[in-house]
Amino acid sequence: ERFGDQVLVLSVDARRANTASGFEVTTHGGKKSAGIDALGWIEDAVSRGVGEILLNSMDADGTNLVRLSTNGQHNLDPRWSPDGTKIVFAALPSGSEYDLYHMDADGSNKTQLTSTPSNSEFSPVYSPDGTKIVYRRYDSHNETYVMDADGTHQTKISSTNFTYTDAIVDWQP
């Protein structure tokens, strides 16, 4: 609050690992482990005032680093499509509510999937075949929705009261 949310920016390089969140922070372009759980570190940074988290992508060997979020928006919950060609995520474009977007893995072709001015959508996850996305919508009813991967056919599938930590959704066999 002292500086304003958009002044404090966090850029994280992470890779899959055996940590609480399943990801660890890396250094040296993804080549060395920092020994820190990525989600825990990001949550700590946000609690300390970080207002923007940059999404990055790189090859497994640490080369070809590409910043995927260059728009100054607050981005959350990035998830890869099963075939690795797209990333779905929540972003705060303006105002105070998050909408869902997806983009190609190289950061191009960003497309808004949801537009609900009085609700926030978050925790998007592609279906195993990549044709659907399940996500949470936070409003007075705290709902779970599913939609086609192009953002059409948004359908409420449940209403529950949940906290943010309970809000993670996933596909099961």
Image (cartoon, helix red, strand yellow):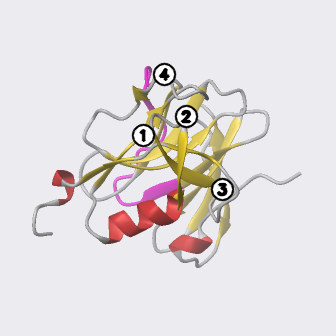
Alpha carbons under labels 4 and 1: distance apart: 11 Å
C-alpha distance separating marks 2 and 4:
9 Å
Question: Are dots 1 and 2 in contact, CB under 8 Å?
Answer: yes
Q: Position of residue 149 (x, y in %)?
A: 63, 34
Name the residue carrying label 3.
22
Numbered disc in front, either 2 or 3: 3
Q: Is residue 23 above or below residue 131?
A: below
In this figure, which residue is indicated by the disc labeled 2?
Answer: 87
Which one is closest to the eye, mark 1 or mark 2?
1
Q: Looking at the image, is mark 4 or mark 3 earlier in the sequence?
A: 3
Give whichever of discs 1 and 2 has the lower sequence position.
1
- Disc 2 to disc 3, C-alpha distance: 18 Å
Residue 92: x %, y % from top left? 33, 50
Residue located farthest toward the right when viewing the structure as drawn: 173
**Residue shown at 53% from the left, 25% from the top:** 105
Which contiguous range is marked in magenta? 107-122
Of the residues under marks 2 and 4, which one precedes in the sequence? 2
Q: CA distance from mark 1 to mark 2?
A: 10 Å
Which of the marked residues, 2 or 3, is nearer the chain's N terminus? Answer: 3
Residue on which disc 1 sits: 55
Residue that badge 4 annotates: 106
Give the amino acid type for the residue marked by disc 2 in the picture. Ile
At mark 4, the secondary structure is loop
